[in-house]
Image: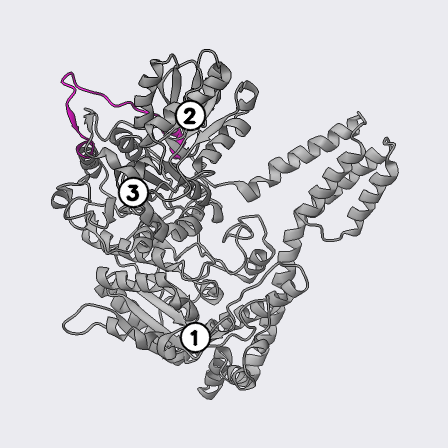
Amino acid sequence: MQAKTTLQKDISFEEFRKQVLEDYTIAVTSRECSLLGRREVLTGKAKFGIFGDGKEVPQLAMARAFRNGDFRSGYYRDQTFMMAIGALNADQFFAGLYAHTDIEAEPMSAGRQMGAHFATHSHHEDGSWKDLTKQKNTSSDISPTAGQMPRLLGLAQASKIYRNLKEINANNFSVNGNEVAWGTIGNASTSEGIFFETVNAAGVLQVPMVISVWDDEYGISVPARYQTTKENISEILKGFQRDEHNEGYEIIVVKGWDYSSLIEMYEKASSIARKEHIPVLIHVTELTQPQGHSTSGSHERYKSEERLVWEKENDCNLKMREWMVSSSIASEEELSELEKGIKKEVREAKKRAWSSFLAPMKIHKKELLSLFEAIANTSVNKVFINKLKNDLIANDEPSKKNVISIARKALRYIIHEETPEKEQLKNWIANYYVEIQPKYSSHLYSEDDLNATKIRAVPPEYSEEKEEVDGRVLLRDNFDKLFEKHSNLLIFGEDTGNIGDVNQGLEGLQKKYGELRIADTGIREATIVGQGIGLAMRGLRPIAEIQYLDYVMYALQIMSDDLASLLYRTCGRQKAPLIIRTRGHRLEGIWHSGSQMGGLIHLLRGMYVLVPRNMAKAAGFYNTLLESNEPALIIEPLNGYRLKEQLPSNLGEFKTPIGIVETVKEGKDITVVSYGSTLRIIEQVAKELLEVDIDIELIDCQTLLPFDIQHDIVKSVQKTNRLLVIDEDVPGGASAYILNEVIEKQNAYQFIDSAPQTLTAKPHRPAYGTDGDYFSKPNAEDIFEKIYAIMHEASPKKYPRLR
């Protein structure tokens, strides 16, 4: 059903007629899918529905201007576009609605995202790249409104990088930077700050981006007058319009039901963006939403009678149909016959998709009924087993939950019986989870050989001179080696380029490698991360720098909802190995010494969170990550840039292992676990504790996600029988996470003689100044006294109460 990608100017009427009918067929198919999809939700076969009805015709025009190699970063109403580029058919549409977990049946996300969230596959099953230049690409959709915009910026910028940096191997990723990134967004979602941030950044960068705003004048129940100044997004963005003296945007306004004008305007936008690398905004007006926002409610509740009548009369499919008849492209009778056939095809696709969805559950149901039959014949609780069996028989359309739930309940009735049949049921349940659980839990992290935890550690090597330099020099020289080694490596952020970052960890490198590879950006954290996501999705290796850890909060939604979930929500078919570089921890003041680790490690599952204690460790993490294919956040210790460290002789080659803790000091009395800048304080306290005959074993977590994958901390606890976690996060933050990992997951509780404890910062942000740090975060005296108190409890005579 894929539409041809061009509408040539000099074609015969018959060829033109064929193209238009082809498009109309897709539009009607998409509309029928929306109508039937809503019914499937209301009858309970699907949980929720959000559809693209009312937006069909402009999406046909967008699809005709879309080329191989292009990328879409879109909005959950683009089903017609996906059908028009050949990336979605009716069977797959309904498979998505039912949450089919087979990637072949539901290629968008294998049932992990609700229907209408689309994607194409950038990777083969083994994780290797496909040739993105020979297919039409869609980056995986997300639900948060406007959340697709920051990523769009990076997808577009990649074309600029590939066009201007010829030393980069563009095979599989670009043909001379000719690709356009196409964004779609609803008019109400343009109220989000990240929309404006992206629009501004794209205007500054001058990248090949086309943004389509689907304007139906509502945001669920809220009309445009409450959403947008002047009720018109293109009107208020006029200041971005380029002119003969200033770079900017090309802004186009077109009615969403005017097929011929839409085709013309989208071809124009494509040509401008593709050839000139100019961003374009297309404001598509007078669109409708025939079924309302979603299946959660009816738009009759909030639209006036006049508006509802207007929407019926100005429906884009109806308008296109009227135009086709009036232009003698097709007759009423011909179109009625076509529509009748399409309705039948869509109904049949729905039936096939539902049957395919149910097929594995019916097999499992049959297996379980056979087991119940055998169990009932030997169990004293036969009557209860038979009731479960009959309940299962009565369920003609069982879900996976129905099947496994009833199997687990059956075990309760034979808990005291020891029979072969019971063992068969237990084995069946275990095998069921082996088969089914990965369909919901796989690909949180990379499952191929480039998983970062598989990259072997390479220790730093040192010359006999043991040269000592500032930590920032070690970091800078290591980055220098990495930029020599990886031609597709880029780094960008606030003050990253000209001055080489605020701590000079990139000093002089922009002059050496150019402004495209080491770049300054505006103050716009969400789109800095978005740039990185899009660039990484197109085969580049970006490092996005956020000046301070506290400012990561501006980008946290993008990091959590988009970057961290990308591999998971595409079942391994898309990835963005972006490294986010920042600095934080102990210094001075509320806004520059953040340690919000508890929040980050819970919101960023799917990324690595790395907390090096010095710059050698940080450099080693960069070296490791650039050999892998996974996203990570690296938090450099803010107070370590001017501290002296030995300069390794194997810069760019040594690798800090990910997921492995390091025993910084061996001891016998208590295991102390910490990370980052606090390690330096504990190391000093450890020497002071020896003076009172307390010998601590100090362990550096190094990475919080993943955490101690070799379970080395429990081995230490088994030796010392005591555990203290020291953390500069708030109480219940990262310290609680670490305690859970060690006590529960590593089962260290069985070796504990004293209650495991934590020592954290106060529950407020750190106050300004040296004294503010002292009274806000764990200081040397706090640490000494906490450890001493634990030892006092264990041996009061040897360690009398201190205070």
The segment highlighted magenta reads 450-474
Q: Residues within 10 Å of mark 3 (few under 14, many from 20)?
A: many
Nearer to us in this view, 106 or 234: 234
Residue at the extreme bottom of the image, as rendered? 326
Is 12 inside the magenta-drawn segment? no
Q: Are marks 3 and 2 in contact (CB under 8 Å)?
A: no
| Residue 251 placement (x, y as % from top left) | 29, 73
Residue of label 1 = 226
- Depth check: 577 or 359 in front? 577
Q: Residue furthest front?
A: 803
Q: Dividing the picture into quarters, in which one does residue 465 lie?
A: top left
Query: What colouring method underlies this structural image?
Result: one colour
Which mark is in front, 3 or 2?
A: 2
Residue pictured at 51% horizontal, 85% vertical: 310
Q: Secondary structure at mark 2?
A: helix
Q: Which is nearer the N-term, disc 1 or disc 2?
A: 1
Taking the spot 54% from the left edge, 83% from the top edge, the residue there is 304
Q: Give the residue drawn at x 71%, y 44%.
A: 403
* Separation of marks 1 and 2 at Cα, in angstroms: 56 Å
Whether residue 33 is visible, yes or no, is: yes
- Residue indicated by mark 2: 786
Q: Tell me residue 6's x, y (percent).
A: 35, 69
Q: Are marks 3 and 1 in contact (CB under 8 Å)?
A: no
Indicate which disc, 3 or 1, sits on the residue closer to the N terminus. 1
How crowded pointer 1 is (Cα within 10 Å; few <14, some 14-19, many 20+) is rated as: few
Percent x, y of residue 343: 61, 71
